[in-house]
């Protein structure tokens, strides 16, 4: 079997001491980020991008991947114990998880979250290994028109799954596309919208914008939210980590359902872990015999979303590794990391860089194992970390971000630009615009423009090429019907329902 | 009674919103003017402030109307960049500002957000107006920016319209302290990292940023700031091997 040979090769790579160390560091940093509220995964990955300069490419990507799934993990710990979701992905876990903790069942809640995450991680790892090769073959049949349509579909998914107004989400994507066009034109080399500023000639750095919109803007926003966040720590000692037999039986089906749902939503572009956890929670509530138990410490409400977000975090690597298209903002940063190391993401990566791809896949499984072994004993330390007051944390984050951006190009102008985008991000938050679609638009912008131009050049300016090529037509049809469905009132209310779940 | 009071309240708010939009409509011109003040002291190369004011004023009051009339009567001339800015960016926003005066804004959050986004899109349209368009069936450098710029104008108009037609939240409150000091810290960092080195810059920036919260206790902040500075000074240049100046240039030499 090819898959097993590949996976075995991957484990050999991932088990080398340096890569094991990178995996451990990534998982720990990720957990830390997940635990601390007010600093998100996107900002951290952006902040640590320059740090990976000195590392070998495989190690660097293993570490960054570790941060991503580690954060899903860490977020659940604080959700359950302190009712502060460190990450958007664990917002729903807090609903039932914290109730369980209040009833003195924090141990089982944490254990189930860990077991669910681990199981989902294992399944997702296998899924990546199985789906990788066939999807790569499919990708080779893709022409520019298909690529363009696929990206349109991805962006539409991002719109459908974004919170709030559809119109605003589309506007954010288009703004992102426009921002991506600043700098030199790929084909003619003409300087576009750069106003003769030399630092803009290369275009806006992706990490710069990400750090501004997600890092600085978040800090500014938290500052004017004012006052220390309410932290009612669960003070009693956590005794008895082991869930009872009944807990295990109760949570097995939700874990399975959460894994399946999360895996699917992770592969779809635009989705990712946040929506997966919301959807899994809603599904469990719909299926439950007695939905009233939810919100009062139902173990299913912990098991399902935790499995779903971990599964989604991992399967979102599939489009990146096979098609070279990042399905969400964190994956977009991974593209940045790959480019820094001279790897062009896309179908050829699987053949040209088997070490990288399979090593990373294998490391995910190892990373998940590490997380389950390390984190349960460390729970106490993570909780103590939460007592670090925000007034000391935020200046530190500002400095770290500033040094991080500066070191990408050794350019002070980048730091100022990130600051400006911080203000832009603050404005976006104030007007209820979502920054995530903007970032996705910015990443896909150059790819989209290039493929659009190429497709039209090949078809000699005939726009109907997107509809006459069957694959492209199907993709566009799916995109159109999705958009139509979202605007329909029935589904709209359903979608709002999913999101309001998080707010109470 | 309550009704009339409510009405007058919206009326005053509308005037200030409209005034804000007018200011937004000439924001690029004002920005260039402020920028050009630097040339008096010999910073940067560009036009002096007087030349900037004259160029934009003539474009706004004479050039652009002239170009409009010219276009209507069929003799199209190549317009200058200032005239284009007035035509593409300022005039539509002035129009929006005037319309605002006569509207009841039902959701200021959406309406103002939509209009500012529209301003961004119009600005992008102006910025890409000097680029080459389609050549036969091949894209020019300016085709895609114009396409997406136009799309964004339409979308943001839609958002602004939602703000007029449906009820929604008003403007949310903007704080000044956090943004001001965090931005000041970032600016200080960017401007002094080259000359003052990592150690001084990181510590001072930390303290500036810490001022952004009213809960800050100075002694505590200074201690944490010092520890963080030492940590960064070890982590970045030595452990990670990133080249970075450590100490102020005048001390090293």
Image (cartoon, coloured by chain):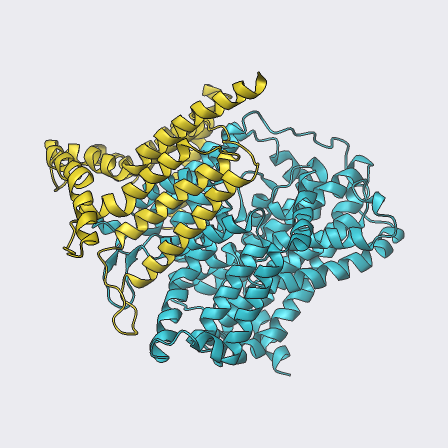
* The N terminus of chain A - image quarter: bottom right
Vertical placement of A328 versus A291: above or below?
A: below
Question: As drawn, is A368 to the left or to the right of A391?
Answer: right
* Most foreground residue, A480 or B98: B98
* The C terminus of chain A - image quarter: top right
Q: Please state the horizontal and vertical placement of residue A244, each as a whole percent of the image.
A: 87, 50
> Looking at the colours in the rendered structure, which chain would you say is drawn in yellow?
B
Vertical placement of A356 versus A219: above or below?
A: below
> Looking at the colours in the rendered structure, which chain would you say is drawn in cyan?
A
Q: Please state the horizontal and vertical placement of residue A13, each as a whole percent of the image.
A: 54, 69
Question: As drawn, is A325 to the left or to the right of B33?
Answer: right
Q: Please state the horizontal and vertical placement of residue A294, each as a whole percent of the image.
A: 80, 44
Vertical placement of A50 versus A229: above or below?
A: below
The reply to whether residue B231 is visible in this rendering is no
Q: Please state the horizontal and vertical placement of residue A368, each as a whole percent of the image.
A: 65, 58
The reply to whether residue B87 is visible in this rendering is yes
Vertical placement of B73 versus B201: above or below?
A: below
Q: Residue at x 58, y 38 (%)?
A: A37
Question: As drawn, is B196 to the left or to the right of A158?
Answer: left
């Amino acid at each position: 079997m090819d898959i097993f040979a590949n996976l075995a090769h991957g484990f050999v790579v991932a088990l080398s001491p340096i890569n094991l160390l990178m995996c451990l560091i990534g998982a720990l940093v990720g957990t830390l980020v997940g635990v601390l509220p007010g600093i998100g995964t996107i900002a951290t990955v952006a902040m640590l991008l320059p740090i990976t300069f000195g590392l070998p490419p495989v190690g660097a990507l293993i570490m960054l991947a570790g941060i991503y799934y580690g954060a899903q993990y860490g977020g659940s710990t604080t959700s359950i114990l302190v009712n502060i979701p460190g990450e958007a992905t664990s917002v729903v876990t807090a609903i039932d998880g914290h109730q369980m903790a209040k009833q003195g069942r924090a141990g089982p809640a944490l254990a189930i979250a860990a077991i669910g995450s681990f199981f989902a991680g294992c399944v997702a790892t296998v899924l990546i290994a199985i789906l990788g090769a066939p999807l790569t073959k499919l990708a080779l049949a893709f022409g520019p028109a298909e690529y363009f349509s696929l990206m349109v579909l991805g962006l539409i998914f991002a719109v459908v799954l974004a919170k709030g107004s559809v119109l605003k989400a589309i506007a954010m994507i288009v703004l992102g596309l426009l921002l991506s066009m600043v700098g030199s034109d790929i084909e003619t080399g003409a300087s576009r919208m750069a106003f003769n500023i030399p630092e803009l000639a290369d275009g806006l750095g992706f990490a710069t914008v990400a750090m501004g919109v997600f890092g600085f803007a978040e800090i500014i926003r938290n500052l004017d939210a004012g006052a220390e966040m309410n932290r009612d720590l669960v003070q009693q000692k956590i005794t008895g980590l082991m869930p009872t037999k009944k807990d295990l039986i109760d949570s097995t089906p939700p874990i399975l359902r959460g894994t399946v749902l999360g895996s699917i939503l992770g592969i779809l572009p635009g989705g990712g872990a946040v929506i997966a956890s919301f959807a899994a929670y809603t599904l469990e509530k719909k299926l439950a015999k007695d939905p009233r138990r939810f919100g009062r410490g139902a173990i299913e409400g912990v098991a399902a979303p935790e499995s779903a977000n971990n599964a989604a975090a991992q399967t979102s690597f599939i489009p990146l590794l096979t098609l070279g298209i990042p399905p969400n903002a964190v994956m977009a940063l991974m593209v940045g990391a790959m480019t820094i190391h001279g790897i062009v993401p896309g179908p050829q990566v699987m053949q040209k860089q088997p070490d990288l791809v399979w090593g990373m896949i294998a490391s995910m499984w190892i990373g998940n194992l590490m997380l389950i072994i390390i984190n349960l004993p460390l729970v106490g330390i993570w909780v103590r970390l939460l007592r670090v007051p925000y007034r000391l944390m935020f200046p530190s984050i500002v400095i770290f971000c500033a040094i991080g951006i500066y070191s990408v190009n050794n350019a002070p102008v980048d730091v100022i630009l990130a600051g400006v985008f911080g203000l832009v991000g603050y404005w976006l938050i104030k007007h209820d615009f979502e920054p995530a679609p903007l970032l996705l638009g910015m990443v896909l912008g150059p790819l989209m423009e290039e493929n659009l131009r190429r497709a039209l050049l090949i078809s000699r300016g005939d726009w109907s090429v997107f509809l006459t090529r069957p694959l492209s037509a199907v993709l566009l049809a799916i995109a159109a019907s999705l958009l139509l469905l979202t605007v329909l009132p029935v589904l709209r209310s359903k979608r709002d329902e999913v999101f309001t779940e998080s707010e109470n | 009674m309550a009704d009339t009071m409510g009405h007058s309240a919206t009326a005053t708010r509308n005037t200030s919103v409209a005034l804000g939009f007018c200011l937004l409509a000439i924001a690029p011109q004002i920005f260039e003017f402020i920028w050009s003040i630097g040339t008096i002291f010999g910073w940067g190369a560009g036009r002096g402030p007087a030349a900037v004011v004259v160029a934009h004023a003539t474009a706004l009051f004479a050039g652009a109307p002239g170009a409009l009339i010219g276009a209507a009567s069929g003799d199209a001339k190549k317009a200058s960049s200032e005239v284009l800015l007035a035509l593409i960016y300022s005039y539509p926003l002035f129009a929006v500002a005037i319309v605002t005066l006569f509207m009841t804004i039902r959701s200021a959050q959406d309406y103002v957000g939509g209009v500012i986004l529209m301003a961004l899109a119009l600005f992008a349209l102006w910025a890409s107006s000097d680029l080459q368009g389609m050549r036969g069936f091949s894209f020019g450098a300016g085709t895609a920016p114009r396409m997406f710029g136009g799309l964004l104008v339409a979308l943001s108009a839609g958002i602004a319209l939602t703000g007029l037609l449906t009820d929604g939240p008003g403007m949310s409150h903007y704080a000044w302290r956090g943004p001001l000091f965090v931005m000041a810290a970032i600016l200080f960092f960017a401007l002094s990292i080259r000359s003052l080195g990592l150690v001084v810059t990181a510590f001072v920036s930390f303290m500036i940023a810490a001022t952004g919260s009213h809960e800050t206790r100075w002694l505590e902040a200074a201690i944490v700031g010092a520890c963080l500075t030492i940590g960064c000074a070890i982590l970045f240049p030595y452990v990670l091997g990133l080249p970075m100046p450590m100490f102020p240039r005048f001390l090293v030499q």
